[in-house]
Amino acid sequence: MLSKIDITFLRSLRETAFRRQHKAFFVEGNKMIEDLLHSELNFREFYATEEWIYSNKALFNLVEVYFTNKEEPVFGKAKVNQENIKQIPSKEMERISAFKTPPGVLAVVEIPRNKSIGEEIKNELVLCLDEIQDPGNVGTIFRIADWFNIRIVICSPGCADAYQPKVVQASMGSIFRLFPITMSLIDFLKENNKINSGEVYGSFVHSENIYTSELKKDGVIIIGNESKGISEELIPYITKKISIPSYSSGNTSPESLNAAVATGIICSEFRRRGQGSGVRDKK
Amino acid sequence: MLSKIDITFLRSLRETAFRRQHKAFFVEGNKMIEDLLHSELNFREFYATEEWIYSNKALFNLVEVYFTNKEEPVFGKAKVNQENIKQIPSKEMERISAFKTPPGVLAVVEIPRNKSIGEEIKNELVLCLDEIQDPGNVGTIFRIADWFNIRIVICSPGCADAYQPKVVQASMGSIFRLFPITMSLIDFLKENNKINSGEVYGSFVHSENIYTSELKKDGVIIIGNESKGISEELIPYITKKISIPSYSSGNTSPESLNAAVATGIICSEFRRRGQGSGVRDKK
């Protein structure tokens, strides 16, 4: 049984301010729990219904191993205590879950500290999200970054918060494998300019055709807001404006692509240029 | 003032069965109304609040012109009667709108008849959606098809209905410029084989690297369900299996890309091969 205070605390983690205060967020569902066990993130607490435990014994056992206070930390993680595994009634799960039909399993996870930006951005592709407001788009972009091995994603403070339930869900576990950093993009770009001499690419509707542009293996790619595009104050930092050309031929034509779709096409275009090195699935 | 019957009718258009029965759907918001005026689709009725009419005189005037019974049909459309323009109170708009905060303007539009599949698929790229269930994905894919000038999109009966409010909204007006056809994909593929000798491409997780595959200018591209992929019974029709390679390098890696993002990357890859012909934005 959860106390009223527990329930209030867990529900408060739906709000960005409380997540930041408590440095914690929650995830739900089997796939997410599995991915979490293999990630570098730390569980704080684990909640499951009796039905879930009964139907998912193998996974529950892995979680128990993780939470058991052994000499050696499991999966290289911090040691935790089995007291933090709680079996709760379905009615209580319904109150804390962000789903209408709760999957029956929920973990409270520590938000990793913002890494300080340093040498690790050198020779890498970095994605900067400029006020991407739809949480589905932010989560989908994390999934794209993970797929294309872009480890560093910088989110402007105006983006949907990286750890809100809808973002976490849309990322399909990719959030555990990336380092989303929330900071001012201008501060990042200034720091980047000190470390890197690379390009800063900005995605626009009518600019240089990305298919025929020269694209380097490293650099920063800025993705603009869903309706307003890239913020005015970032434009001076952009060294190359790129566009995905439209082939539309009607009286009216679409004004743009969805922000996550555009990000996918741009990342694909950067990576395909390096064909022959490091492609996992290549035949 | 709307009668109770009117309200029940308008609200019923949120359900696929009623839309099919009445051969009508509704759209909301200024951008959608503008795109609709320039499309080949026919309005049936138009609802707006006093506030909306007051703030959008130019657009309202265009709608009035459209609905006025002139000798010449406006924008090449069927003649209609001004009686079909209705000013309604905000409270009623709230009851019929699919939005929490209604934009104040809503049009009931005729669903165009399913075109019969014939010669128009010859030498074209056709997208087939196999049980794409998320309405946001279906709408986003329509927007992608429009951007890349793929005019024919075939939706299997298990897809989110093309005319449901969330699909229409996510398409950002692209649904007015395409011909989404709902039919059995097997029936379509049989018909296609009679007309075309082209390839049928299927998108899979581990197959031939799309970046280095030979891609023709025409053919059919099948996009599979978000979690199950392409249906077993369609596989015999596929002549070429393609994949977007993953560059991920962690312990665990993402299982797939979002269905709409994958569609965007695939369509981009087909069109970029034809660089130099028909690209609108090329510089």
Image (cartoon, coloured by chain):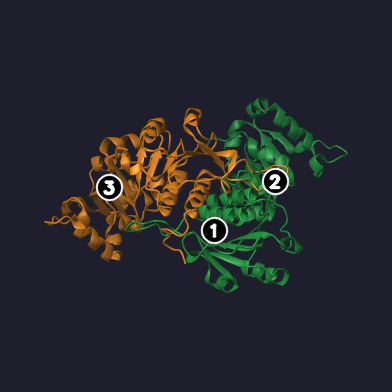
Chain colours: A orange, B green
Q: Are marks 3 and 1 on the same chain?
A: no
Q: Quadrant of the N terminus of chain B?
A: top right
Which mark, by number, is residue B109? 2
- Which chain letter matches label 2? B
User: Would residue A96 appear left or right of A281 to someone viewing this image?
Assistant: left
Residue B125 position within the rendered picture, expressed as x and y whole percent measured from the top left: 66, 59
Amino acid type indicated by mark 1:
Ile
Residue B203 position within the rendered picture, expressed as x and y whole percent measured from the top left: 53, 63
Q: Nearer the viewer, mark 2 or mark 3?
A: 3
Residue A234 position within the rendered picture, expressed as x and y whole percent measured from the top left: 47, 31
Amino acid type indicated by mark 2:
Val
Report helix, strand or loop for mark 3. strand
Front in this rendered view, residue B32 or A111: A111
Q: Could you classify mark 3 by the number of other residues whose Cα lies within 10 Å: few (under 14), some (14-19), or many (20 or more)?
A: some
Q: Residue furthest right?
A: B71
User: Would residue B29 appear left or right of A263 to someone viewing this image?
Assistant: right
User: Would residue A12 appear left or right of A221 to someone viewing this image?
Assistant: left
**Marks 1 and 2 close (CB-CB < 8 Å):** no
User: Image quarter for residue A192?
Assistant: top left
Front in this rendered view, residue B74 or B98: B74
Which mark, by number, is residue B132? 1
* Residue in view at x 20 percent, y 59 percent: A64
Report helix, strand or loop for mark 2. strand
* Residue in view at x 44 percent, y 39 percent: A129
Measured in 3D between alpha carbons, the distance from the residue under mark 1 to the one under mark 2, in whole angstroms, is 24 Å
Residue bearing mark 3: A108
Nearer-N-terminus badge (1/2): 2
Q: Residue furthest top?
A: B54
Q: Quadrant of the C terminus of chain B?
A: top right
Report whether residue B31 is seen: yes
